[in-house]
Image (tube, rainbow, N blue to C red):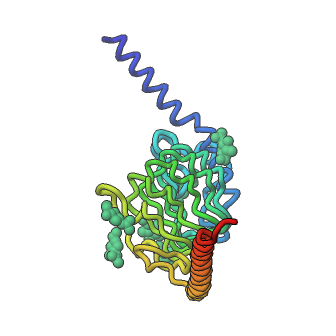
Amino acid sequence: MGLWTRHHLLLLLLSLLVCTCFSDPSDELCLTHLSESLLDPTKSLQNWTKTTFSNPCSGFTSYLQGATCNNGRIYKLSLSNLSLRGSISPFLANCTNLQALDLSSNALTGPIPPDLQYLVNLAVLNLSSNQLTGQIPPQLTLCAYLNVIDLHDNLLTGQIPQQLGILARLSAFDVSNNKLSGSIPTSLVNRSGNLPRFNATSFDGNKDLYGYPLPPLKNKGLSVMAIVGIGLGSGFASLVLSFTGVCIWLKVTEHKMALEEGKINHLMPDY
Ligand SMILES: *[C@@H]1O[C@H](CO)[C@@H](O)[C@H](O)[C@H]1NC(C)=O
Ligand SMILES: *[C@@H]1O[C@H](CO)[C@@H](O)[C@H](O)[C@H]1NC(C)=O
Ligand SMILES: *[C@@H]1O[C@H](CO)[C@@H](O)[C@H](O)[C@H]1NC(C)=O
Ligand SMILES: *[C@@H]1O[C@H](CO)[C@@H](O)[C@H](O)[C@H]1NC(C)=O
Ligand SMILES: *[C@@H]1O[C@H](CO)[C@@H](O)[C@H](O)[C@H]1NC(C)=O
Ligand SMILES: *[C@@H]1O[C@H](CO)[C@@H](O)[C@H](O)[C@H]1NC(C)=O
């Protein structure tokens, strides 16, 4: 029994040592690159310094403001409403234990890095109220635990990736007030089983987005084209029809004439 207790004590001591003394090199990479890509004009992130990045966690507590740790790893980053500028570093992907990323209500620019796909534990992604551009990376589908995707109030373009509908745990989805276009994926609005379906509030404020639960595509330029198309099409169709009619008539008369001729030939005596 004594031996077991000693073993347990040793193990506990060792794990404590691992938690407090040896930080994770990929977390350090992640934080270093993130702080380089973010601009902090109001000096909100006072203690985001290089020395802290090498050891951001002490077990369950973090030395970095806005960061939360779990077992010596960064598992939550909440840097909302801090007047941050700059872009989102793709190296955020190195914080592999990250479960929640909230960079909302800042002035961040540039794209949403597709590298976020490597955050396989990510459950909450809130990048709302920034000036992010580019497309919504379809690779986000690989973050199977995503519960929340909030990207409202940005400058995102392109289509909403169809694949996002397969995220089984998705319970909050907001891409309102962007510059998205195309039809809304039915996989998000008409989901199978009892998965939550997202209504118009999730999609409002995107000029070129259409389809249920928003109104269908109605483009004046296109309807004029459609009318012209229908006109030309029916004109062509009637032309083909009358041509075929004439052809048939000619064939019939030819046949009749041939018959008549045959009759005449038949009546003619042979010499
Ligand atoms: C950094 O700031 C946070 C909150 O502002 C504080 O809890 C933490 O102790 C600070 N860390 C250091 C190393 O100063
Ligand atoms: C954002 O921060 C400013 C101060 O920097 C504060 O006045 C405002 O209420 C905050 N907004 C939210 C939504 O927390
Ligand atoms: C860190 O992230 C970058 C960008 O995704 C990737 O290229 C690199 O391989 C990662 N490094 C480690 C050690 O995970
Ligand atoms: C995302 O952040 C904004 C601003 O901080 C907040 O109002 C919103 O509720 C968050 N989204 C979700 C789905 O929690
Ligand atoms: C939505 O799904 C239901 C069945 O769950 C189906 O009957 C309906 O046609 C679907 N609507 C659209 C617009 O796909
Ligand atoms: C959309 O759904 C949300 C809950 O997810 C609800 O609060 C809101 O009232 C709904 N809006 C409409 C227009 O149905």
Count of numbered marks? 0
Against 52, residue 39 (above or below) is: below
Residue at 61% in and 83% down: 239
Task: Pick the residue in front: 159 or 259.
Answer: 259
Residue 90 in view, yes or no: yes
Q: Residue lying farthest front?
A: 271
Against 269, residue 145 (above or below) is: above
Look at the image and tell me in which quarter the N terminus lies.
top left
Against 60, residue 195 (above or below) is: below
Q: Assign ligand 5 to one image quadrant.
A: bottom left
Task: Pick the residue in front: 30 or 210.
Answer: 210
Horizontal and vertical percent position of residue 192: 34, 56
Q: Is residue 101 left or right of residue 112?
A: left
Q: Is residue 151 left or right of residue 257?
A: left
Task: Pick the residue in front: 38 or 209.
Answer: 209
Residue at 51% in and 57% down: 101
Residue 157 in view, yes or no: no
Tell me where residue 28 sits by quadrant: top right
Look at the image and tell me in which quarter the C terminus lies.
bottom right
Residue at 68% in and 52% down: 33
Horizontal and vertical percent position of residue 84: 62, 68
Residue at 49% in and 25% down: 14
Horizontal and vertical percent position of residue 262: 60, 70
Horizontal and vertical percent position of residue 224: 59, 88
Q: Is residue 72 left or right of residue 91?
A: left
